[in-house]
Amino acid sequence: MPEVVGIKFKDVGKVYCFDPNGETLTPGQYVIVNTARGVECGRVATGNEIVDEDKIVAPLKPIVRIATEEDLKKVEENKEKEKSAFKICEEKIAKHGLEMKLTDVEYTFDNSKILFYFTADGRVDFRELVKDLASVFRTRIELRQIGVRDEAKMIGGIGVCGRPFCCKSFMGEFAPVSIKMAKEQGLSLNPAKISGACGLLMCCLKYEHETYEHLSKITPKPGAIVDTKSGRGVVTESNLLAGTVKVKLDDFPDAVPTTLNRNQVRILKDGKSSISKEEQEALKAIEE
């Protein structure tokens, strides 16, 4: 089984596996590595460990060396260059009259390439812009169109909860989020209440989904026909977290529904918790 180290290239980003190349590395160290986009400086996220072959993407690239003081100084210099390149690119975008919004700029460690990230409502013909930028920077230029989630992750901000965006704080990768998750958690399907600053469904809907999914399976849904010690009835309301249901008993149709623990009822025919086509269409724009 191969020995690997986990390397990050952003403070909050995906961890990539590399061959330690005989070095014993600890989290926090900086290393120089060859990547698909060129030579980069990354930070060790996980130290040396032995993993199964099926957990890595072959071929495993070796680290070049542990970063020196000169290397780290160059990284800081590149950050300053990125600020300047950002302003220049914005001016060039305005000059060419392109409908695009520049989000971020990255220099590769060896300055062999500059990447410009942008958002746009549709496709953008940026061929002339690339030529213009190449004539200014005299190196390879790459423009990448990104989605609104990636834009939020790059820029950051404060969510409706009052805390920094999860994607900017600790999420290495985005996970799929669906309207079904909000529905199962009993949340309002008002787009304004379940959308993040990016305009799509809030990533935090995913965090408790497995718990709600499990509780939903063992808790009778509204409309379910159940058997209780007081007789048969229909569930009118359920509380997944409290584990209780309200049952309207067949023998007492005019009485207030009885509150019971889910363990005190036996499901004869479960109800349905689905999203109507109208709701799906109305919320389609915020579901990625």
Image: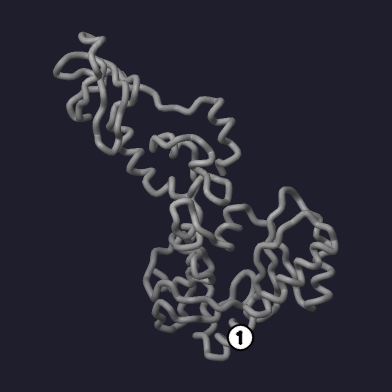
**Residue 154 in picture, x, y percent from top left:** 58, 63
Q: Name the spot of residue 221 as percent of width and height, x first.
A: 33, 26
Q: Quadrant of the C terminus?
A: top right
192 and 82: which one is in front? 192
Number of numbered tags placed on the structure image:
1
Q: State which quadrant residue 101 falls in.
A: bottom right
Q: Which of 256 and 260 lies nearest the eye of the viewer?
A: 256
173 in relation to 194, above or below: below
Q: Specify the amino acid type for callout 1.
A: Lys
Q: Residue furthest left?
A: 229
Q: Quadrant of residue 37?
A: bottom right
- Please name the residue shown 17% across and 26% down the image: 264
Position of residue 123 relative to residue 24, above or below, is above
Give left or right: position of 218 versus 129: left
Q: Position of residue 82 (x, y in %)?
A: 67, 75
**210 displayed left or right of 162:** left
In the figure, 81 relative to 115: above or below?
A: below
Q: Residue at x 74, y 56 (%)?
A: 100
Look at 71% across and 70% down and name the residue there: 86
The foreground one among 118 and 141 is: 118
Residue for point 48% across, 66% down: 15
Classify residue 193 as left or right of residue 85: left
Quarter holding the N terminus is bottom left
Label 1 belongs to which residue?
A: 74
Query: Is disc 1 placed on a helix, strand or loop?
Result: helix
Q: How is the image coloured?
A: one colour
Residue 58 coordinates in the image, percent (x, y): 52, 65
Using the image as rendered, state which of residue 203 and residue 134 is in the foreground: 203
* 140 to 77, vertically: above or below: above
Specify few, some or many for label 1: CA neighbours under 10 Å numbering under 14, 14-19, or 20 or more.
Answer: some
